[in-house]
Image (spheres, coloured by chain):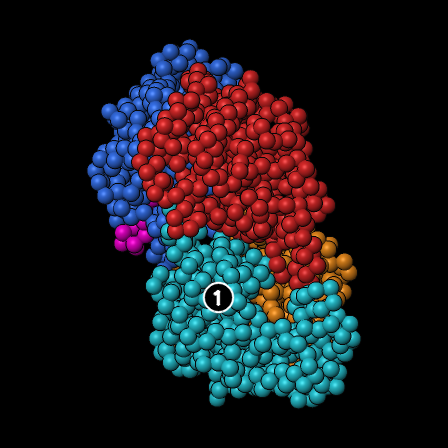
Chain colours: A orange, B cyan, C blue, D red
Amino acid sequence: MLSFASDYTEGAHPQVLKRLCETNLEQLSGYGTDPYCESAKQKIKAVIGKPGADVFLLTGGTQTNQIVIDTVLGACEGVICADTGHIACHEAGAIEYTGRKVLPVAQTEGKIAAETVEAYLQSFYADDNHDHMVFPGMVYISHPTEYGTLYSLAELTALAAVCRRYEIPLYLDGARLGYGLMSAGTDVTIADVAELCDVFYIGGTKVGALCGEAVVFPRGNAPKRFFTSIKQHGALLAKGRLLGVQFDALFTDGLYFAASRHAIEQSDKLRKLFAEKNYQYFIETVTNQVFIVLENRKMEELARSVSFSFWERIDTDHTVVRFATSWATTDEQLAALESLL
Amino acid sequence: MLSFASDYTEGAHPQVLKRLCETNLEQLSGYGTDPYCESAKQKIKAVIGKPGADVFLLTGGTQTNQIVIDTVLGACEGVICADTGHIACHEAGAIEYTGRKVLPVAQTEGKIAAETVEAYLQSFYADDNHDHMVFPGMVYISHPTEYGTLYSLAELTALAAVCRRYEIPLYLDGARLGYGLMSAGTDVTIADVAELCDVFYIGGTKVGALCGEAVVFPRGNAPKRFFTSIKQHGALLAKGRLLGVQFDALFTDGLYFAASRHAIEQSDKLRKLFAEKNYQYFIETVTNQVFIVLENRKMEELARSVSFSFWERIDTDHTVVRFATSWATTDEQLAALESLL
Amino acid sequence: MLSFASDYTEGAHPQVLKRLCETNLEQLSGYGTDPYCESAKQKIKAVIGKPGADVFLLTGGTQTNQIVIDTVLGACEGVICADTGHIACHEAGAIEYTGRKVLPVAQTEGKIAAETVEAYLQSFYADDNHDHMVFPGMVYISHPTEYGTLYSLAELTALAAVCRRYEIPLYLDGARLGYGLMSAGTDVTIADVAELCDVFYIGGTKVGALCGEAVVFPRGNAPKRFFTSIKQHGALLAKGRLLGVQFDALFTDGLYFAASRHAIEQSDKLRKLFAEKNYQYFIETVTNQVFIVLENRKMEELARSVSFSFWERIDTDHTVVRFATSWATTDEQLAALESLL
Amino acid sequence: MLSFASDYTEGAHPQVLKRLCETNLEQLSGYGTDPYCESAKQKIKAVIGKPGADVFLLTGGTQTNQIVIDTVLGACEGVICADTGHIACHEAGAIEYTGRKVLPVAQTEGKIAAETVEAYLQSFYADDNHDHMVFPGMVYISHPTEYGTLYSLAELTALAAVCRRYEIPLYLDGARLGYGLMSAGTDVTIADVAELCDVFYIGGTKVGALCGEAVVFPRGNAPKRFFTSIKQHGALLAKGRLLGVQFDALFTDGLYFAASRHAIEQSDKLRKLFAEKNYQYFIETVTNQVFIVLENRKMEELARSVSFSFWERIDTDHTVVRFATSWATTDEQLAALESLL
């Protein structure tokens, strides 16, 4: 069946898979010490313009959030996060599992404002009882957000400024970073991300890899013994090559960006399609996720021929659904969808 | 360079990789809900003869040990383990990280005897202070062990009997299970493992997969919400297909066993080679790991032309090293090694 | 200086201290196995009308919340709590420290409604993604609440009914339970608490003890190995007598209730005082905590002669402050305060 | 019945209890901010000769070990400890509960040698795989040990030297420190302890207090936010005065040392008694714990008239038992015991 359910319905980008096949019988050392991991890290450092960065390759997004947040936070610290943030809602308590509190704050379309963070921090330190409370020790944002929206460079810069003023790191969850960077509607580059954030990850799973996320500490500021922490969290792959070869392929000849751009082009077409048919947007996005409000009857009718994601119920008759494109979305799929709308 | 360093130096078995390629562009649902995961589970249940088993696919060995032990243990319980056991020594404290104590006991060539476990349990409950201590709540064994040795069916049966008498589960770490099952020197079948253990895993990473371990609760006895626990530990892959397709391939037409048998055949040749050249064994094994005592001068000489694993220093002049074969080891590699010995 | 800052500014009720002195040189066994602990537990079971209850004596409130919540919750479960609840705000993340998520919900004057809890539970189970989320596994309420308010019997009954329908335990934090039970404005008895809750604690620290909270599982439903869990959380006192003698004294001849009633009588006088002087209440309470809105100038003036607690800023000119009475509050102290108002 | 079962069978030293009574109705601020806590800390700093020390008052020994070890250890670190150490055996896994591994090493009569620690550290760093293992991050010793033995100044100095060479802290569990310091057989002063250790605690519970242990970071080297960590571990008392008044009394006019000396004098008499009656020592101690080997028949006979502690079974006919004296042991009790031997 036709599917726009998510950006992880296919396997790997063919070019990534090709490299896995080509290197398959090479005998390589384990645990990320192989030359492909090294090459991938070098290419990532080059593309973000931070030769002194620390780069680590992990397997999945929740795993990455859990390990980064747990190792970066200090004693009695929690992480400020949009109340719609992935770590606050949909990671089964993976952050709390490691003993860390998520500190949710209000958001707009998935984004938190520098002012919101500053107000939280001011109010925290103004409270005489704050020694009996969880210290805000990090700000977590996702870019694109869970609603497919993007921070502007000005917004990101303002957030980073607040974080630096209070000396807490800014962490950017880039599970779909490529789609954010290639969107026409953004003024944020990957170099900006590396400059403004203290740690971020470049999502692979949703952008062309079978699995894999590249964690970047742009100023060589990885926590002490991060490698062993990965092992301690059960996240170290014996065949680190699986991640190394994939990221090496993704960052060769700009594949990561090209694949992301393709998804954005397809989502632009998708948006045009919905607009022509007068569908109503729930949130206007410029990335690869498109949120549409459907009458329930229409939703059920469509669901017979195409997969999409249920997002949230609006009222008794209407529902928000998500259509996502990816590096793999074809024009044929879009044409097939058009005929159903 | 020629390498016998480990059984995870190559990527995936070609047949596994082929299936990843063939299914790559199929649009599949995420998080292990795809038909390949389902098919893999059905095939595993069939091969172990337990249609009511619960099967889950995870990514790596330490991760699997961490999640299984953490979710199976009850309040204030720890896990009995050989003092040489992987979880006791080489998992960076992943078990303790989740709040659980490893309770090491004496072993012989990596194996723990039923008598040792029984003595531990008797002595624990005979101690009036045991309410101030960590309760033994599980027995962990590896098969093959970290020394490449195997439990006999009688030994395994005796261990299971003690566990049942004390009502604690027996957990078998089968990171290299295939190599154990295909060894000429064993009387233990996979059906025996499923019958005698309360939980075990079938290792994929070291037996032909890029990554992946299949956890089996043979009597449908998975802990409540095990799926959510996987997520909470950061171990749930969005593209569960990566594991499903691989295990489906490994358990189609007996590939898992054929690949394992090949490794054993090559290790038998390897043993013959070493014997002919009068090398001294550290431990006599029948699985794919061969432990040899080398004079340090010889070790350094060999190391220039072939990779192997340093195991432990015996005295100032001698060192134990490990040579491992795998599903990928060729006769050409053995011939090349022979010329170096 | 005159102080109404809290209900824990003095040491122990004189009758409690007297018993500590009288029993001081008796040689008693440790870890709560002495006859005073036993006697205290029997008296508590009698007063709540639950002869089959399990009773444990702990040292402090945050400790009690941490241990009860951690041991009662099941796999991947969190605890629903008012967003103003003590565990959500002022326990330094003690709940999350043990790996458990606090699930905050909206409240009114510190109380959560049965409807709010039911809506949360319905919405949770209606969400197709709930297997990726933290399961609501308990409802935590405080009685009196952090705002000195009380649940009515009808409200408590409704909450208990929702909890039973969804098979999750209802836990009542009774740090100031005595003050709640002795208030003129309540229709809730301690027997009601024992009947409706699945676990609760009778606060000692704030009601006449030097330290100590009595945890009650009214239906003999203590989690397995709760004693060892206390030890594992570092909360087991060698000289358990310290808690046993105090609770034995508090539950002899109704001292716990008499001492609480005294505090309520004094707070009623305090309320009368404030009313006569036309002070404005922030929240109308019937327990031993009185919340007043003060002009900042007046607040600073008063603060020179009497201690009270800062609660929260209302606007640039007004502040909420708390005056608390206790078993130790004298008429002389009230007269001294009157002269300052 | 006559009891030599332990040094915590009585309540508080009468002088300590007197001060609790005298200060009982003073209105004091909470959470350790009262003047008695401050005074106690000043007196402790003076007596150890470290005016810049950080001192914190906690409630019990396991709690103290748990919090100190958890907050002092860094990423992926565990604590080296005698395999007979209290944290390794009798704290119900309280250390592992916080995610930390206890690293047991061989001991003699409860003591670990500097050479043992050095060998462990050398071997750890010599292992190429140590990045996959738990890093040794602290050395824990008890003084007196669990066997009542004492480190000599030379032994302590050697341990401290190894720790400094490897830059890991030395932590001394002084649950019975007073008894160790007042023993005739020691050349270690409290100033030596403060000089050689990086953190230690002065036990109150077993040396005259109802409860309480004073943690000392002699060089002002308390971990960041140690106060909030205490709260987060559920260990912060609202009425901190309970600890402050007791330690203030214990460190006024040398009461801590006088009470300890009394226990030692009584244990010296006890040793003389046993020697005169030709009882056999299990271990020769100079502190307040005396370990005797008894024929089982004699043991049962004695047990009818006097309480003592079962320690361990030696063979089918003989058992090790412990007799302990304390600040409370009287000559009458010794005379009564003599008549039974």
x, y percent for residue B214: 48, 73
Please tell me how crowded label 1 is: few (under 14), some (14-19), or many (20+) other residues with Cα within 10 Å.
many
Q: Please, what secondary structure does the residue beneath circle 1 have?
A: loop
x, y percent for residue A19: 67, 80
Instruction: Give the mark count.
Output: 1
The residue closer to the viewer here, D188 or D121, is D188
Q: Is residue B303 left or right of residue B99?
A: right
Q: Which residue is mark 1?
A: B112
The residue closer to the viewer here, D194 or C323, is D194
State the residue at coordinates (75%, 83%): B340
The answer to whether residue B187 is seen in the rendering is yes
Q: Is residue B131 above or below residue D64?
A: below
Magenta span includes C166: yes
State the residue at coordinates (58%, 43%): D111
**Range covered by the magenta-colored residues:** C163-172
Magenta span includes B53: no
The residue closer to the viewer here, B4 or D274, is D274
Quarter of the C terminus of chain B within the rendering = bottom right
Quarter of the N terminus of chain B within the rendering = bottom right
